[in-house]
Image: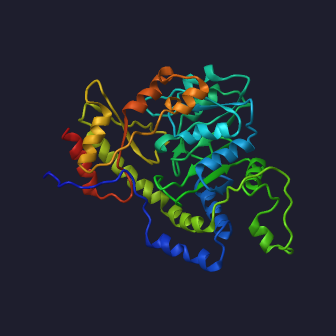
Amino acid sequence: MAKLEKRNIPISLPAIGEEEWQALREPVMSGWVTQGPKVTEFEKNFAAHHKVKHAIAVTSCTTGLHLALTALGVGPGDEVIIPAFTWVATANTVIYCGATPVFVDIDPLTFNIDPSQIEKKLSSKTKAIVPVHLFGLCADMDGIKRVLPDNVKILEDAACAAGASYKGQMAGTLGDAAVFSFHPRKTITTGEGGMVTSNDDLLAETMNIQRNHGASISEEQRHHGAKPYLLPDFDMLGFNYRMTDLQSAMGLIQLAKLTDFITERQKWAKFYIRGLASIDWLELPEIGKEYKHGWQAFVCTVKEDLLPQGRNAIMEHLQQLGVSTRPGTHAVHMLNYFKKRLSIESQDYPAAYAANETSMAIPLHNRMQEEDYQYVVQCLKDI
């Protein structure tokens, strides 16, 4: 294959366009620009796609995690188990509740929480666990459930996992509740935004009320009721975590494209795996046959014993060639706030530490063309 000329390939771009633009007209013209009928429709369609009873739209995955943890009863004095390698929001939301995040190391092959490390972190204070389906690959839920006492709640951090599944069961149905993200780096986007899912009727009702200040009925129900001039009662403490109809109008269009988006990402992930297999210093992602990977990101590991210049030098080199990369995410226990607050050291979780230093995401998104993927492979093979 002839050498390709230099290209500029971002790490991610949202696949949005004319359809999403046109979808905004209806809420703008109707006046329903906050939570209204489009939110209801988006929730219904998202729940159907993920084969779950309830879906509750929120302002972000972060607020969704906070909402779900609160509804699960997490509070001061409780401990919540989370993986050491994840986005900081997973840990932050535990602290929002007054609880303590307890880190567990990861499986270096999947970047997900290592079930064999969980049992030793359980205590009488353990209220919940938040397994993260990192980069679109579901955590080993059977392995996790084998070591958990029945009283410990499971909240899936499915930020990256829209459309993914584990042993034929959709992400969002694998615990007591789950939370998805619609940030622009995710497979589908509403700008900011998130979705909480659950098969628990009471839990879903509680979260539905709490996301709307604790109001007994939603604004849509009140405006369409017999007495719209009366304010609702407030029976519990709540938050303003409501998604807007503007976001949901866009989300409906994006959700209809989710299956095709993932199919395309699967195709190019296989292209990468074939094209990069001969690079001895690059460890490629592995997935089991029982997993449907959502491929929110394609994250490799740079084997620094075989490439002494290290991961950061590779990322700088690729940046000069027009190929954007990022670390997979960060090891939260290595961030200054958590090191000081919890008195932990960077080396306390060696697999997460290694992932922090050597993981590398390369471009994979639905705005890329075949020549873009070829160029990324060419640049990596030329090193």
Q: Is residue 92 left or right of residue 263?
A: right
Q: Is residue 20 left or right of residue 27?
A: left
Q: Nearer the viewer, residue 245 or 52?
A: 245
Q: Is residue 16 left or right of residue 276?
A: right
Q: Is residue 186 left or right of residue 47?
A: left
Taking the spot 22% from the left edge, 45% from the top edge, the residue there is 379
Taking the spot 51% from the left edge, 58% from the top edge, the residue there is 189
How many numbered circles does the render carry? 0
Taking the spot 59% from the left edge, 37% from the top edge, the residue there is 91
Q: Is residue 166 above or below residue 344?
A: below
Residue 13 rendering spot, x and y as whole percentages: 40, 57
Look at the image and tell me whether residue 210 can be seen: yes
Taking the spot 63% from the left edge, 68% from the top edge, the residue there is 38
Residue 306 rendering spot, x and y as whole percentages: 26, 26
Image coloring type: rainbow
Residue 147 rendering spot, x and y as whole percentages: 63, 25
Look at the image and tell me whether residue 307 can be seen: no
When asked about the image quadrant of residue 303, the answer is top left
Q: In the current view of this chain or complex, which residue is farthest to the left?
A: 2
When asked about the image quadrant of residue 353, the answer is top left
Q: Is residue 80 above or below residue 166?
A: above
Q: Is residue 250 above or below residue 72?
A: below
The quadrant of the image that shows the C terminus is top left
Residue 225 rendering spot, x and y as whole percentages: 82, 73
Q: Nearer the viewer, residue 88 or 126?
A: 88
